[in-house]
Image (cartoon, grey):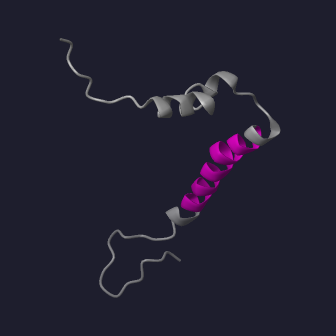
């Protein structure tokens, strides 16, 4: 007797995955205006905006050698 599988395969879920092409969507990918826009925003614009915000705040505060009552903000 063969050992029992630890995961039960649901045939309805397998049919649904094939119907909406969730498992092999990468095979039919095409660059269009909308996919290019999403790629530019997600891979260039948002990380660039985060980098800019971090660079602006990087030298704004100094925690080294501050005593009680001294401001953290640099002048």
- Which residue occupies 42% across, 77% down? 72
Quadrant occupied by the N terminus: top left
Q: In this view, does 53 lie above or below 8?
A: below
Residues drawn in magenta: 36-55
In this rendering, would 3 be left or right of 55?
left
- Which residue occupies 21% across, 13% down? 2
Residue 3: x, y in percent? Answer: 20, 17
User: Residue pushed farthest right?
Assistant: 33
In this rendering, would 48 be left or right of 73?
right
- Which residue occupies 64% across, 51% down? 48
Magenta segment's dominant SS is helix
Q: Is residue 54 magenta?
A: yes
Camera-nearest residue between 27 and 6: 6
In this rendering, would 22 be left or right of 2?
right
- Which residue occupies 38% across, 28% down? 9
Residue 57: x, y in percent? Answer: 53, 66
Q: In this view, does 43 lie above or below 21?
A: below
User: Residue pushed farthest left?
Assistant: 1
Q: In this view, does 55 lie above or below 16?
A: below
Residue 73: x, y in percent? Answer: 47, 77
Res 49 → quadrant: bottom right
Res 67 → quadrant: bottom left
């Amino acid at each position: 007797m063969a050992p029992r599988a630890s995961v039960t395969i649901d045939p309805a879920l397998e049919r649904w995955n094939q119907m909406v092409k969730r498992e092999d969507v990468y095979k039919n990918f095409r660059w269009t205006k909308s996919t290019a826009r999403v790629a530019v925003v997600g891979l260039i614009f948002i990380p660039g905006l985060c980098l800019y915000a971090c660079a602006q705040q990087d030298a704004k505060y100094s925690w080294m050698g501050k005593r009680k009552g001294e401001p953290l903000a640099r002048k």
